[in-house]
Amino acid sequence: CSSDLQSWESTPHMQAFYDVAATAQHYFEENLISYVKKLAGRYPEYRHLIITGGCALNCTTNMKLYQKKLFEIIRCNSS
């Protein structure tokens, strides 16, 4: 098992893997934040947001949502 990990980590394609992961994170954040902004604008009477599932596990995006102050309370439950 550890030899598989070592060979994977030493692949010459690691930079490509990093780039794909960073690109996916960027687009995920962009789309989720855009969607949440629309929700906040459309339903200003709702001051709490609950995020569940895999989205709730994305700490980077959750912090960016929190910093935007679109909702008073953001709860993140991982199902």
Image: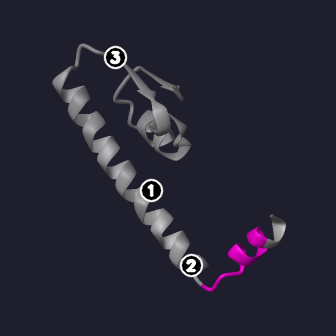
Query: Is 29 or 55 nearer to us in this picture?
Result: 55
For disc 3, the marked residue is: 47
Which residue type does callout 1 highlight? Gln
**How far apart are the two marked residues, 1 and 3, measured between alpha carbons?**
26 Å
Q: Predominant secondary structure in magenta?
A: helix
| Furthest residue toward bottom | 12
**Which residue is pictured at 51% across the width and 25% down the height?**
79
Label 2 sits on a secondary structure element that is helix
Q: Residues within 10 Å of mark 2 (few under 14, many from 20)?
A: few
Image: magenta residue range: 4-12
For disc 1, the marked residue is: 25
Quadrant in the picture for residue 34: top left
Of mark 1 and mark 3, the one earlier in the sequence is 1
Contact? badges 1 and 2 (CB < 8 Å): no
**Which residue is pictured at 22% across the width and 19% down the height?**
44
Q: How crowded is mark 1: few (under 14 residues within 10 Å), some or many (20 or more)?
A: some
Q: Residue 1 carries which label?
A: none
For disc 2, the marked residue is: 15
Instruction: Residue 6: say if magenta.
Output: yes
Which residue type does callout 3 highlight? Arg
| Furthest residue toward right | 2
**How far apart are the two marked residues, 1 and 2, measured between alpha carbons?**
15 Å
Label 3 sits on a secondary structure element that is loop
